[in-house]
Image (tube, rainbow, N blue to C red):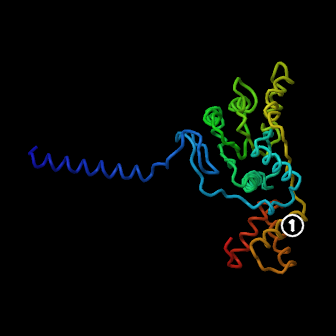
């Protein structure tokens, strides 16, 4: 190979490597905190990326728009206020019917508590994905030595057969030598009251040498939550109250009888009533009216 061809080949290789480097920078994840964050109100725990990813805008529904869950709303909000103020508070499990505002309530309570702090250190919300529960002790160690208070949130938490990651959660919440840090609280939502499928618990009863002890091992996880807040399918009155609240908040100008007729027809088409169904109807109606939400 002549010197000229060799130089040309080296130049092409260098150009190719430069393009690859630019492409990798473009698709690379953003900067991730490996220590407790000093600023910001919301984060997502991404252990595969090395730490905490900041969330600029939380998809939160205003607290007054959460209708039909008054008792759970008041209990969780008061528990969150106490924790934000440095007082004792309980881990909370929000369980029950789909689409009834469990995760929306967690985010709304966090936002409401922060609004009331007025200049004091703000409460940080950290979402941890179900598949990352086994890394919860690692996150706890990062947060333990920090002065800020952290609300950890896992949406749609449940465990299937042969899944042993629930043991990490048990140890992080109340067990183990370190236990849960005083500046950390854990909220979880689930469709299951005991976080385990019923057939899994029944199988434990039928196959274990001591059935009661086997079931206790599974059920004891939910006992780590001091607050159990149940969410149930809403009545027609609650569903229409949700529709009224959304329509007033977003200025959807529709005659009430016509609004109710459309809302009930939408729910019938979806096969049930819930907060999620109400929000989906409002989105459809806003699009029809040309209103931006």
The part of the image, by quadrant, that contains residue 141 is top right
Question: What's the residue at 80%, 66% (across, down)?
Answer: 269
Q: Secondary structure at mark 1?
A: helix
Does 202 sit left or right of 30 as displayed? right
Which residue is under mark 1? 241
Instruction: Identify the image quadrant of the C terminus.
Output: bottom right
When the figure is inspected, residue 157 is found, relative to residue 288, above or below; the finding is above
Question: What's the residue at 76%, 68% (across, down)?
Answer: 281
- Toward the viewer: 155 or 179? 179
Does 74 sit left or right of 291 as displayed? right
Question: What's the residue at 61%, 48% (across, down)?
Answer: 43
- Toward the viewer: 109 or 292? 109
Instruction: Identify the image quadrant of the N terminus.
Output: top left
Q: Position of residue 131 (x, y in %)?
A: 64, 40
The part of the image, by quadrant, that contains residue 187 is top right
Question: What's the residue at 71%, 69% (across, down)?
Answer: 283
When the figure is inspected, residue 221 is found, relative to residue 229, above or below; the finding is above
Q: Position of residue 62 (x, y in %)?
A: 75, 61
Q: Going by the picture, which residue comes out furthest to the top?
A: 209
Q: Position of residue 185 (x, y in %)?
A: 73, 40
When the figure is inspected, residue 117 is found, relative to residue 138, above or below; the finding is below
């Amino acid at each position: 190979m002549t010197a000229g061809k060799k130089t040309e080949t080296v130049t092409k290789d260098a150009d190719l490597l430069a393009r690859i480097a630019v492409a990798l920078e473009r698709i690379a994840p953003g900067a991730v905190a490996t220590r407790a964050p000093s600023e910001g109100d919301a984060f997502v725990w991404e252990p595969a990326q090395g730490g905490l990813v900041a969330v600029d805008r939380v998809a939160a529904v205003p607290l007054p728009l959460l209708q039909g869950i008054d008792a759970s709303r008041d209990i969780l909000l008061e528990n969150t206020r106490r924790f934000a103020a440095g007082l004792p508070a309980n881990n909370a499990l929000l369980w029950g019917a789909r689409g009834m505002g469990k995760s929306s309530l967690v985010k709304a309570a966090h936002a409401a508590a922060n609004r009331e702090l007025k200049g004091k250190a703000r409460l940080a919300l950290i979402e941890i994905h179900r598949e990352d529960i086994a890394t919860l002790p690692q996150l706890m160690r990062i947060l333990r030595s920090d002065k800020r208070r952290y609300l950890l949130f896992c949406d749609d938490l449940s465990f299937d057969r042969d899944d042993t990651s629930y043991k990490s959660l048990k140890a992080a919440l109340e067990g183990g030598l370190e236990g849960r840090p005083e500046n950390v609280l854990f909220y979880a939502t689930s469709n299951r009251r005991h976080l385990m499928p019923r057939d899994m618990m029944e199988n434990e009863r039928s196959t274990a040498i001591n059935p009661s002890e086997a079931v206790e091992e599974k059920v004891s996880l939910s006992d780590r939550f001091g607050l159990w807040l149940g969410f149930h399918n809403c009545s027609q009155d609650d569903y229409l109250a949700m529709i009224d609240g959304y329509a007033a908040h977003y200025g959807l100008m529709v005659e009430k009888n016509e609004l109710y007729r459309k809302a009930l027809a939408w729910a019938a088409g979806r096969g049930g009533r819930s907060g999620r169904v109400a929000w989906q109807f409002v989105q459809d109606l806003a699009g029809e009216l040309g209103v931006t939400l």
